[in-house]
Image (cartoon, helix red, strand yellow):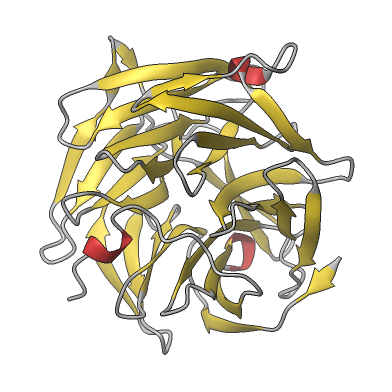
Amino acid sequence: MSTLDFDVVTTGLLFPEGPVALPNGDALVVEIHRKTLTRVTADGTRSVVADLGGGPNGAAIGPDGRVYIANSGGLNRFEVGPYAFAGGTPEDYTTGSLQAVDLETGAVETVYTHCDGSSLRGPNDIVFDAHGGCYITDHGKSNADVADRGRIFHCAADGSSITQVAGDMNAPNGIGLSPDGTRLYVSETYTARVWWWEVVAPGEIVGGRTLAGSGDANFLWGSGDFRYFDSLGVEANGNVCVASLATPGICVISPEGELVEFVEIDTDGDPGITNICWGGEDMRTAYVTASSTGKLLRFEWPRPGLVLNNQTRAAVV
């Protein structure tokens, strides 16, 4: 276990998620309970880029420079002591979606709500490949009695095609690609496991190396401690960094399936560490969302993060 110094960039966010580091030093987050895409400058100034509705959860820059949003369709807000959480299915829920936001105008386009006649239930996280398409996790929706099985989709950014590439998962959450694009990683929330597939072509993934793997995936690593997994990011060297709930911090896992380190994060005891991304000239400025206390944190990370596909294409207005 290790600890790193950090700065609190801003507070007062309403369950922030999906951080995106912009080329000019700003960061974007979605706010699930405010239902917005929000810009945060280096000095912590906040401004709403777009009102999204539903429950925006994950974000990534697309090949056209717009920000694509995995929108769950909405999540209930509940509080335990001083901490906020998101979950369940709100009364006004209709469907999940993939949206695209123009950073210059704030215009929002809904790109997908269905695949082959089946609605997107609870899109959670998103990553773009080098070919202009994106993979999204569908965490599903739940209530006190039942919960969906999770799915993974591959989508063309222009709205022309969407395909389910995996299913029968237990609350898939974070998603990322290896530096060479040949592995797709997904974290499952309640099992606290990370799975991977071989990417054999754009939108084509192959697993099956692990008996009874979730979504026919290959097993990478699972936690034996009390924690849940949220979203993930990938370092330039291929390590997978998974945000840890309940035991708050970041699990750093090697491509060989070994725990490299656990970075403990304590900010007012926030149990809701949900995501990580990187920016800066050397890609060692890490942004982490502390969702249950509504903060965006900034670290000098010990290793550079991976430069994501399209990351430098975002407008910096």
Residue at 50% in and 31% down: 89
Residue at 58% in and 82% down: 8
* x and y percentages locating residue 81 in the rendered image: 74, 61
Name the side, left or right, on which 50 lies relative to 183: left
Asked where in the image residue 181 lies, by quadrant, the reply is: top left
Note whether 289 is above or below 63 in the view shown. Answer: below
Residue at 28% in and 65% down: 312
Would you say residue 203 is visible in this rendering? yes
Residue furthest to the bottom: 43
* x and y percentages locating residue 152 in the rendered image: 46, 25
Q: Nearer the viewer, residue 220 or 8?
A: 220
Q: How many marks?
A: 0
Name the side, left or right, on which 71 lies relative to 140: left
Name the side, left or right, on which 284 lies relative to 80: left
Asked where in the image residue 263 lies, by quadrant, the reply is: bottom right
Which of the image's four quarters has the C terminus? Answer: bottom left
Name the side, left or right, on which 155 lies relative to 283: left
Would you say residue 140 is visible in this rendering? no
Q: Nearer the viewer, residue 104 or 184?
A: 184
Residue at 15% in and 57% down: 102
Which of the image's four quarters has the N terminus? Answer: bottom right
* x and y percentages locating residue 262 in the rendered image: 79, 60
Note whether 29 is above or below 173 in the view shown. Answer: below
* x and y percentages locating residue 291 in the rendered image: 58, 61
